[in-house]
Amino acid sequence: QKYSNASVVWMGDLNRNVHSSIVKNLMAGYIGRDTFKVEDVAKTKGSTHMNGGEAIDHIFGDHNAVVLKRGKHGSTGQGVTGKVLSGSDHFPIYSILTVGR
């Protein structure tokens, strides 16, 4: 409530793809209670983990305050399925955004 007009960008390793109920609820603005909707602003195609599968690392932005620059998002192209990348089992993603209301 204190910062109700703040723009929000949330990123991290959720170990869940965008089809999971947890991520669907998050994107719809519900995480145990009503909050605000977010959009997947990385829009990563393919795996973000060394074991393969769908993306489980995400960047989300408040759908009212974050604008994705066209074509500037996704995987960095680093990482190979089956191999650790510089000590991490996850691969990097990025998104170039304009943030603000």
Image (cartoon, helix red, strand yellow):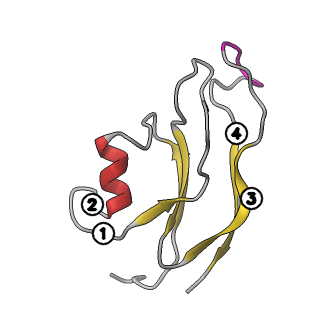
Which residue matches tag 4? 92
Which residue matches tag 1? 35
Verify whether residue 81 appears in magenta. no
**Range covered by the magenta-colored residues:** 82-86
Q: Nearer the viewer, mark 4 or mark 3?
A: 3
Q: Nearer the viewer, mark 1 or mark 3?
A: 3
- Contact? badges 4 and 3 (CB < 8 Å): no
- Amino acid type at circle 1 is Thr
- Contact? badges 2 and 3 (CB < 8 Å): no
- Amino acid type at circle 2 is Tyr
Verify whether residue 84 appears in magenta. yes
Q: Residue at x 49, y 80 (%)?
A: 6
- Amino acid type at circle 4 is Pro
Q: Residue at x 38, y 41 (%)?
A: 19
| Element on which disc 1 rests | loop
How packed mark 2 is, by other alpha carbons closer than 10 Å (few <14, some 14-19, many 20 or more), is some
Q: Earlier in the sequence, mark 1 or mark 2?
A: 2
> Cα distance, mark 4 to mark 3?
14 Å
x and y percentages locating residue 11 in the rendered image: 55, 52
Q: Residue at x 52, y 31 (%)?
A: 54
| Element on which disc 4 rests | loop
* Left or right of 55 on screen, residue 22: left
- Amino acid type at circle 3 is Lys
* Left or right of 14 on screen, residue 86: right
Which residue matches tag 3? 72
Q: Earlier in the sequence, mark 1 or mark 3?
A: 1
- Contact? badges 1 and 4 (CB < 8 Å): no
- Contact? badges 2 and 4 (CB < 8 Å): no
Which residue matches tag 2? 30
Q: Earlier in the sequence, mark 4 or mark 3?
A: 3
> Cα distance, mark 1 to mark 4?
27 Å
